[in-house]
Image: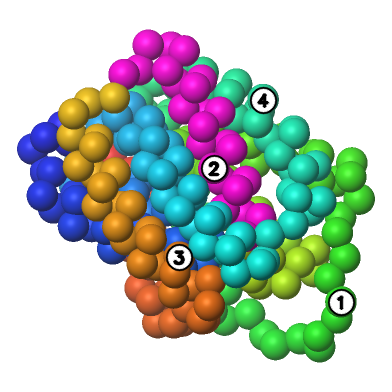
Amino acid sequence: MLEDSIVILAALFLIVGALYASVGHAGASGYLAVMALVGINATVMRPTALAINVLVATIAFIQFWRAGHFSWRLLWPFAIASIPAAFIGGAIELPARPLRIAIGVVLLLSALRMVWVVLRPPRDAKDPHAPPVPVALGVGAGLGFVAGLTGTGGGIFLSPLMLMLNWANTKRTAAVASMFILLNSISGLAGVAAKGWRPSPTLLVLAVAAGIGGWLGALYGSRRASPSALRLLLACVLLVAGVKLLLA
């Protein structure tokens, strides 16, 4: 249970919150990885990650918005489709084993995404262009459902799509992803709560730790670039945790 590892989890949540918020993310995949490595039950992991996401994504969004990188026009097609999908995903009660597998797959994909960000080849600069509305709606619905089902915010997959397809530059992608994560996390958590979940007292301790880390990371990331070495280290953590969940 969370209570048995609260000190270790709080320290790790602070670090994860800082690393993820520096690139506009709330850190759900990182929190899931940490809890998997500590041995927390998968059914506890999902609502905990979603709840922490709400706080850290809010902090990250405020910092990137204040720095002038956010665009409602780019966000809204993703968001209106993802919010109901995230609620549906959060309301689905998977048995422990399938849930562990689903979270494990998300962690492995997240690790690959981190490596891609570091190793992607440079390309000629082109003016970004927003995706067609039907495409954005489809992407939002798919990522929202996965977000609610697994306890992530969906931004870990939205960001690489936006960058690969040149839908936005790096800073704008981070700003849009932070609000996308926030909305999905609230909706997914509402779906979990509709099935009877209630927060434990230890959640506040983890939220404070992640919130401090998130504030520091977002403050840094909204104005500077994140170190590549940290991304690779985080990818290794995600990889180990994902394999652990799949083999458990």
User: Residue 104 magenta-drawn?
Assistant: no
The residue indicated by pointer 3 is 218
Marking on residue 197: none
Task: Please rate how many residues cluster around mark 3, counting C-alpha atoms within 10 Å: few if below 14, some from 14 to 19, many from 20.
Answer: many
Say which element carries label 4: helix
Residue toward you, 96 or 93: 93
Question: How far across and down, in percent of the image, does residue 208 sit?
Answer: 26, 47
In the image, what residue occupies the spot 62% across and 46% down?
Answer: 180
Q: CA distance from mark 1 to mark 2?
A: 27 Å
The residue indicated by pointer 4 is 84
Give whichever of discs 4 and 3 has the lower sequence position.
Answer: 4
Say which element carries label 2: helix
Task: Please rate how many residues cluster around mark 1, counting C-alpha atoms within 10 Å: few if below 14, some from 14 to 19, many from 20.
Answer: few
Residue toward you, 184 or 222: 222
In the image, what residue occupies the spot 60% across and 21% down?
Answer: 88
Give whichever of discs 3 and 1 has the lower sequence position.
Answer: 1
Q: Amino acid at mark 1?
A: Asp
The residue indicated by pointer 1 is 127
Q: CA distance from mark 3 to mark 2?
A: 14 Å
Which corner quadrant holds the N terminus?
A: top left
Task: Please rate how many residues cluster around mark 4, counting C-alpha atoms within 10 Å: few if below 14, some from 14 to 19, many from 20.
Answer: many
In the image, what residue occupies the spot 72% across and 72% down?
Answer: 169
Tell me if I can see residue 99 in this picture.
yes
Prevailing secondary structure class for the magenta stretch in the rendered image: helix
Q: Amino acid at mark 3?
A: Ala
